[in-house]
Amino acid sequence: MKPRRLLLPCLATCLALACGTAPSVRSSVPRPDLAASLVKLGEQALAAGDLASAEARFERALDADPGSTAAGIGLGQTALARGDLAGAEAHFARALEQEPGAPAAHLGLARVAGQQGRTAEARAHLKGALDADPLRAETHAELAAFTGPAPRGPAGLEETLRRANAHPYDLAAGLAAATALAEAGRTDAAARRVESVLWLADLDPVAARRAWALLGRLDPKWREWRVVGVHSYADESIRAHPGWEFRLRLVWLEASRALGPLLQVRFVPASLQGFASAEASSSLEAIGDAFLAQTARAPSEGVLAAFTERPPPSRTSGERRGQAEFLGRRLVVRLEAESGRVLLHELVHLFGGVHVADDLESLMNPDGGGRALDALNARIVRETRVRRFRGNLENDVLDAVDLEATTRAYEDALRANLVLRRAGLIEALQDAGGSRIAARRAALEAMELDPHLGDVARFVALLHWRGDNPASAAFLLETAARLYGPRTARGRKAAEDAQRIWQGMRPGGDASG
C-alpha cells in the first residue's frame, strides 16, 4: 500500500500546481517546461476573466522559472485587467529588462502609458513593439487609433514627410510623401514609400489607385505587375479579436511577398466585411456554403476570401484547412498561426495550380510543409497569371491566356510525377488518337474519385476543345465525369458534354455548344 499512499500526495501537488493553489516556493533548479505549461493555463484563465486563477498560475510559473518573460508579462496583463496600472507597469518593465524588445512587454507598457495620458510614451512603445514584431495586428490597430489622419494642406518636403511618419495609416499622407520625394528626385525612396502603404488600400481606395499608378512611373518593374483586389470576409470567430481588420490586411501583405514575384501580382485589400457562420456546422464545406450564400451579390471583380478560426469537427479533425475554386475567385481558409501556407496553397489553385505527388516537396503538396512551388506548377501559373477575377471562366481565363502555351504546360504536368498520373489522364491523352475503348479502360482502371482532379481534367478538356482537338477533349471530359462521380451534377454534366463531342465527330454530327 505504500506506493498508493505516495501517489496521492503527488497527484494533489500536481493538481495544486495546475490550479495555482500550491504554496509559492521558488525552485532552485529552473523548470522552463513546467513554467510554459503554467503560463498557458494562466492565459486561459485570463481569457476567461478568472483573474485570481490567472495571477496564481503566473506566479507559480515564475516560481518554476524566475527568468520566464512570459510569466511576467502575464502578471502585467492580469494587473492591467484589474486596473492596477502601477503593478502592471512594474511587471512589464521587468519583462522588458529580461528580454529587450519583447513586443508583448512594449504593448503592455503602451497600454499603461495610454491610460495615464502619456501619449508620446505610448506611441514610442507601440513603435518598439512593431519593430520587434511587424506582423502583430493588435499593435497596428492600437497605433492607428493613436495616430489618426494627418493634417491636410500644402507643405514642404520635410513637413510632408513628418506628417506621413506621424500618421503611418493615412494613405493620402503616404502618397503625398511619395509624390514629394519623387519631385525631389529621390525615386527609390518614393517607391519604397508607396509600397509601404498599399497593404492599407481598403482604407482609402482612391489614394491607393493613385499610389499604384505612381509606383509604375517610379519603377519600370511594377509596370509588368498587376493589382488583384481582394474582398475579405471574416466570420464571428475572427471578428471577436481586436485588430482583426489589420490581421487580414497583414495576411495579404505576406501573400504578396510570397507569391508576388512569381505571379507578378500585388494582392491588395479592396474591402473587409463580415459574414455569419455560427448557424452552420464547423466543417469547412458548411462554412463555405454559408459564405457562398451570403456573397451571392458579391463585388463584380476581385478575389472573394472567407476566413474563420472555428476548429474542425472532432470527428473530422483531419479535414483540410482550406478550399478554393479551381481557376475561380472564391476561397475559404481556417486562419491559424501556421496557416500562411494554407492560404498560399489555395491562392495557387485560383491560378490553376494542381496537386502534386505526396513524395514531392512543393507548396502544392497538400500534406507537405514546403512553401516553394515545384517547377511544373510554376510554369502553369506563369501562363495563367494574366487571368482576371470576374467570375466567368471563359472571360477570366480562356480569353486571357495563351491557349497553346497553357495547354503544353498542363500536358507536361500531367506527364510528370503528379497525382494526376493516378487518374489515368496520361493514358487518355496518349491514346486519344488511337483506340477509344482502350483509352477509356486504362483511365477507369487507375481512377479514384477526386473533384479537384475533375476540375483539372475539365479545364484541360476546354483547352483541347479550343485548340480544335475534340477527341482529347472528349476523353478528358469522360475522365472528369468519373473523377467527379457519375451520380454528381458535375459528373453528369461532364459526361453529357463528352457524349455531345463524340456525336459531333460523326459524319453529319454537330458538336457546337
Image (tube, rainbow, N blue to C red):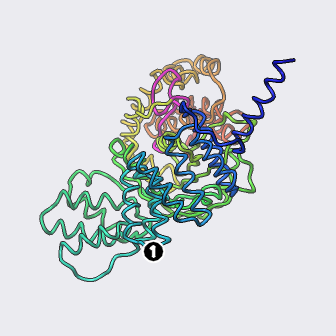
The answer to if 361 sits in the magenta stretch is: yes
Q: Nearer the viewer, residue 243 or 477?
A: 243
Residue 22 horizontal side relative to residue 7, left or right: left
Q: Quadrant of the N terminus?
A: top right
Q: Is residue 152 above or below residue 330?
A: below
Query: In the image, what residue type sits under mark 1?
Result: Gly
Q: Nearer the viewer, residue 351 or 363?
A: 363
Q: Residue 219 placed where, x, y %?
A: 21, 55
The answer to if 20 sits in the magenta stretch is: no
Residue 361 horizontal side relative to residue 448, left or right: left
Q: Nearer the viewer, residue 463 or 110?
A: 110
Residue 131 horizontal side relative to residue 93, left or right: left
Q: Residue at x 74, y 49 (%)?
A: 281
Q: Residue 393 placed where, x, y %?
A: 51, 49
Residue range in magenta is 350-368
Q: Residue 414 placed where, x, y %?
A: 47, 26
Tag 1 secondary structure: loop
Q: Residue at x 47, y 23 (%)?
A: 360
Q: Which residue is mark 1?
A: 117
Q: Is residue 89 above or below residue 206?
A: above
**Residue 124, image quadrant:** bottom left
Q: Residue 23 placed where, x, y %?
A: 69, 42
